[in-house]
Image (cartoon, grey):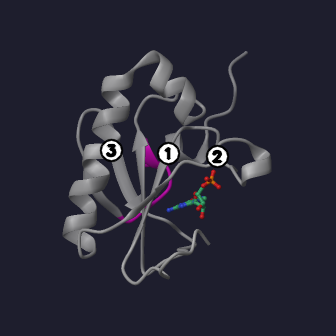
């Protein structure tokens, strides 16, 4: 028996809608449904093999580097080029979707704040 698909797999499969801002053969990026900053995008590898950033880094560092490169590109297109890149890892850190994803936060972040 396989696990039920995550919400991000369903977005990748176009089973549920999302405001998609970028897609290539390896990643998809879309606006977070509950934005925590004026610009809040999610960059998501299409593979569901990795639940968090550490497992992605171990298994496919080139894919992680691509996620980071896409995040930088999108921060330039959707914000002023400055951005915060967040990978929540584990329930205790607030992770709710166990399909690795980068939060790209930008556009008027509070100086010196991690919140
Ligand atoms: P996590 O808490 O796992 O780091 O991040 C999951 C993110 O996915 C949250 O910021 C949440 O708002 C976002 N999210 C959850 N469900 C959906 C959805 O159906 N569509 C979109 N666009 N974002 C979602």
Residue placed under numbered mark 1 in the picture: 101
Quickly name the residue at label 2. 97
Q: Is mark 1 within 8 Å of ligand 1?
A: yes
Q: Relative to the observer, which residue lies in front, 76 or 33?
A: 76
For the N terminus, the quadrant is top right
Give above or below for 108 relative to 54: below
Q: Are discs 2 and 3 less than 8 Å apart at CB?
A: no
Main SS category, magenta section: loop
- Label located before the other in sequence (2 or 3): 3
Earlier-in-chain disc, 1 versus 3: 3
Within the image, what quadrant is residue 20 found in?
A: bottom left
Q: Which residues are magenta?
A: 11-19
Q: Residue at x 49, y 65 (%)?
A: 32
Residue 33 visible in the snapshot: yes
Q: What residue would you read off at disc 3? A: 68
Q: Quadrant of residue 68?
A: top left
Does dot 3 land on a helix, a strand or a loop?
Answer: helix
| Residue contact between numbered discs 2 and 1, judged by CB atoms under 8 Å | yes
> Label 2 vs label 3: CA separation?
19 Å
The image quadrant in which ligand 1 is located: bottom right
In the image, is the residue at mark 2 within 8 Å of ligand 1 by its beta carbon?
yes
Q: In the rendered image, is residue 49 in sight?
A: no
Residue 13 place in picture, x, y as percent:
43, 41
């Amino acid at each position: 028996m396989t696990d039920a698909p995550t919400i991000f797999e369903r977005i990748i499969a176009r089973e549920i809608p999302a405001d998609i801002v970028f897609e290539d053969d390896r990643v998809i990026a879309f606006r977070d449904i509950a934005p925590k900053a004026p610009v809040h995008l999610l960059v998501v590898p299409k593979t569901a093999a990795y639940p968090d950033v550490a497992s992605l880094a171990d298994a496919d560092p080139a894919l992680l580097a691509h996620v980071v490169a896409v995040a930088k590109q999108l921060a330039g297109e959707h914000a002023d080029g400055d951005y915060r890149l967040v990978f929540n890892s584990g329930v205790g850190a607030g992770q709710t979707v166990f399909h690795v994803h980068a939060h790209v936060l930008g556009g008027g972040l509070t100086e010196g704040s991690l919140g």
